[in-house]
Amino acid sequence: MTVTLGDALDAMAGFPEVEPADFVRRGLLVIAPHPDDESLGCGGLIATCRAAGLPVSILIVSDGAGSHPGSTLFPPMVLAALRQQEAILAAAALGVGPSHVHFAGLPDRSVPISGYEAERACDRIAALAATADVVAVTWRHDPHGDHKACFALARAAVRRVPGATLWEYPIWGLTLPPHMPLPGERPRGVRVRVSDHLPAKRRAIAAHASQTTALIVDDPKGFRLTPDMLARFDTPWETFIESPP
Ligand SMILES: [Zn+2]
């Protein structure tokens, strides 16, 4: 069966709204392909869970070194270190301490789905998922190789963990053309209310300054989150799509 992105967005707009306490009961693991995806897609839920005293872990899968390939001031190793620091600051804004922010360090734009590194990442996801009932990863239809790879790794890992359920959060999939066909059925899922913690989410997103500001001055063509893109995530709820096993 095939639906369009427009159908999927219509379905998402009609997802039932749930309270965070009815969504995460034991613990949350967020898997982010790049430093910033966790704040954009799940920042409100992370802050809400922490405020309720629930354990939250964040795994940043790629090193994020590919966002500004033209910069000489921020060559890949420097950029990776900066983005790691930004992710730690963002997590702190959401109430997650540095010991609960994990970095797999896989290459940005080349996250593997097979081989030794992929298996190691899978093992790590499974270990972190052991204390979570909700594992959130980027949507399978996000048009970015790293986002798709992280979905594949998370699906393989969570299948091994009894008691953990995988949910998918859309990032770049929201920007696809509405007529774009998507394989599979109309998505099902929930919209989780995060309005009480929207200010913390905004602070977390802002902590990723290399992606949201002109901090890296010598690569004007480098990646930058546009105001339009940021507005898509500045909402009183966050969307989580059921991930069929
Ligand atoms: Zn990303």
Image (cartoon, rainbow, N blue to C red):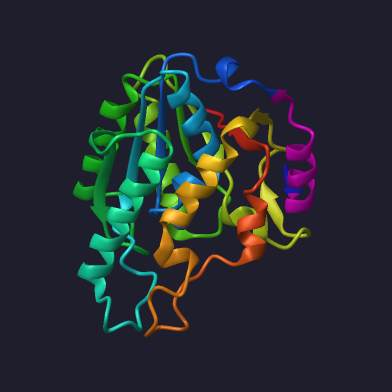
Q: Quadrant of residue 191?
A: top right
Is 63 left or right of 47, judged from the image as shown? left
Whether residue 217 can be seen here:
yes
Residue 233 among magenta residues? no
Q: Name above or below for residue 66 compared with residue 33.
A: below
The residue under the point 60% across, 34% down is: 240
Whether residue 113 can be seen here:
no
Q: Name above or below for residue 236 compared with residue 68.
A: above
Is 37 left or right of 162, judged from the image as shown? right
Q: Quadrant of residue 199?
A: top right
Is 80 left or right of 8, judged from the image as shown? left
Q: Name above or below for residue 107 compared with residue 163.
A: below
Image location of residue 121, percent across then percent down: 26, 42
Image location of residue 6, percent across then percent down: 78, 51
Range of the magenta residues?
4-17
Q: Quadrant of residue 70?
A: bottom left
Image location of residue 128, percent across then percent down: 29, 28
The residue under the point 47% across, 82% down is: 221
Q: How many marks?
A: 0
Q: Name above or below for residue 106 compared with residue 10.
A: below
